[in-house]
Image (cartoon, rainbow, N blue to C red):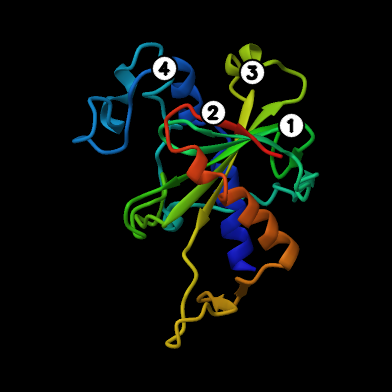
């Protein structure tokens, strides 16, 4: 139960316009590590037309000791999230792998003020397993983070960017599966509250994931885009 509360809180922390979406529109070079470019997080606010420097910005550290549960939040409603044909194309943005959606996937509820259509999802990861996620939970980075970028159903992109609730991003921290001494993946892990989290997936789900990852070798150059068959 505590695990579910934490997940619900984390998801609702990402109800802001995702910076990678803004910056891809701006077309300027940016990064997360200062030695790699001029526009590390501390300098994002000086990017031309940047939407940075406010109080609800990315990246953030979620300090669970100073958070409170919002009892008014209901459950999310996901529409067509299980549609294995929803991905139209896969793009190498130079910062991530981005999967563009065909407009059939929607989300509402969970504290969202409107119904939203999923535009795309993308991943953040690092060169080492302990340094991959964009955001932190109690100062801990996760191996990977997935962002599902959504737009209000009643707005086009230009109008959505002008509204504080025009875009919503669902964020998920992803952990590497635990391995047993024999080297095989364990079927589940347990958190401190005793909640069991299965790591196994159905054969159908694994086939879809394998098909998706098979495209990665074909988008090794920046801006390369492939349509999914």
Mark 2 — residue? 17
Mark 3 — residue? 160
Q: Residues within 10 Å of mark 4 (few under 14, many from 20)?
A: few
Which quadrant of the structure image shows residue 54? top left
Q: What distance separates the C-alpha of mark 4 from that of mark 2? A: 16 Å
Q: Residue at x 64, y 17 (%)?
A: 157
Quadrant into which the C terminus falls: top right
Q: What distance separates the C-alpha of mark 1 from that of mark 3? A: 18 Å
Q: Residue at x 23, y 34 (%)?
A: 36
Which comes sooner in the sequence, label 3 or label 4?
4
Q: What distance separates the C-alpha of mark 2 from that of mark 3? A: 9 Å
Q: Nearer the viewer, residue 58 or 103?
A: 103
Which quadrant of the structure image shows residue 55? top left
Which quadrant of the structure image shows residue 3? bottom right
Q: Secondary structure at mark 2?
A: loop
Which comes sooner in the sequence, label 2 or label 3?
2
Which comes sooner in the sequence, label 4 or label 2?
2
Q: Secondary structure at mark 3?
A: helix
Q: Secondary structure at mark 4?
A: loop
Viewer-nearest of labels 1 and 2? 1
Q: Residue at x 39, y 57 (%)?
A: 138
Give the answer, above or below, for where 89 lies relative to 128: above
Residue at the farthest front position: 218
Whether tag 1 and tag 3 are in contact, CB under 8 A, the answer is no
Which comes sooner in the sequence, label 1 or label 2?
2
Which comes sooner in the sequence, label 1 or label 3?
1
Q: Nearer the viewer, residue 8 or 149?
A: 149
Mark 1 — residue? 102
């Amino acid at each position: 139960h505590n695990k579910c509360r934490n997940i619900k809180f984390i998801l609702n922390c990402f109800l802001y316009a995702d910076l990678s979406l803004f910056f891809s529109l701006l077309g300027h070079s940016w990064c997360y590590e200062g030695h790699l470019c001029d526009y590390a997080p501390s300098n994002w606010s000086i990017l031309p037309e940047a939407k940075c420097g406010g109080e609800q910005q990315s990246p953030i550290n979620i300090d669970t000791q100073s958070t409170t549960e919002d009892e008014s939040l209901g459950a999310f409603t996901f529409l067509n999230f299980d549609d294995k044909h929803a991905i139209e194309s896969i793009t190498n943005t130079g910062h991530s792998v981005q999967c563009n959606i065909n407009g059939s996937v929607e989300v509402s509820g969970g504290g969202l003020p409107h119904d939203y259509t999923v535009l795309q999802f993308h991943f953040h990861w690092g060169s080492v397993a302990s340094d991959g996620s964009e955001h932190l939970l109690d100062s801990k980075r996760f191996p990977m983070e997935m962002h599902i970028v959504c737009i209000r159903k009643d707005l086009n992109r230009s109008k959505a960017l002008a509204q504080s609730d025009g875009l919503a991003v669902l964020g998920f921290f992803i952990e590497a599966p635990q391995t047993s001494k024999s080297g095989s993946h364990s079927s589940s892990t347990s958190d401190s509250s005793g909640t069991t989290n299965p790591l196994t997936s159905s054969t159908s789900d694994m086939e879809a994931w394998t098909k998706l990852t098979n495209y990665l070798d074909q988008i090794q150059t920046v801006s390369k885009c492939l349509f999914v068959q």
